[in-house]
Image: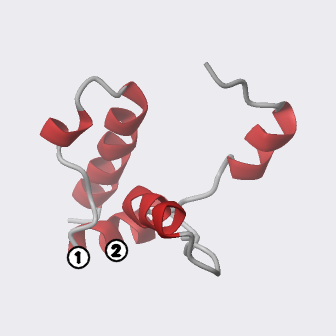
Amino acid sequence: MVRTTNLEYKAVRGRHVNIVDLIEWARKGEVGEVHIFNTVKELSDYSFANGKIYNRDQLGAGAVLTHLLRQLQKARREQT
C-alpha cells in the first residue's frame, strides 16, 4: 500500500476535482491542470450535468470512491 505523507495529504485536503477528469488527465498525460471546484455543490453540478460520474456498479468494493459518490449525491439532493 502506498503511504501518503502529511504534506501530500494537506496539499489535496479540501480540493474538489472530478475524478473522471483526473483519471483521464493522468492517462493521456495532458498538459495543464484539472479544474478545481470551490465547493462540493459546484463539483456535483458539473459532474452530473456532464455525465462524469461513476455509478455504483463501476465502483466495485472501492470504499473511497463510494464515499465520494455519496458526497456528490448529497450535495445534489440539498440543492432541490
**Residue 46: which disc?**
2
Quadrant location of the C terminus in the rendered image: bottom left
Residue that appears at 47% across and 61% down:
27
Residue 31 image position (x, y, % from top left): 63, 80
Towards the viewer: 26 or 67: 26
59 with respect to 17 (left or right): left
Residue 32 image position (x, y, % from top left): 64, 81
- Element type at marker 2? helix
Residue 63 image position (x, y, % from top left): 37, 26
Q: Residue furthest front?
A: 28
Q: Residue furthest bottom?
A: 32
Residue 24 image position (x, y, % from top left): 42, 65
Residue that appears at 17% across and 47% down:
55
- Element type at marker 1? helix
In the rendered image, the vertical position of residue 1 relative to residue 24, given as above or below: above
Number of residues whose C-alpha sits closer than 10 Å to that of mark 2, classed few (under 14), some (14–19) or many (20 or more): some
| Disc 2 + disc 1, Cβ < 8 Å | yes
In the rendered image, the vertical position of residue 12 relative to residue 2, given as above or below: below
78 with respect to 13 (left or right): left
Specify the amino acid type for callout 1.
Ala
Q: Residue tagged by mark 1?
A: 49
Towards the viewer: 70 or 60: 60
Residue that appears at 63% across and 76% down:
33
Q: Quadrant of residue 8?
A: top right
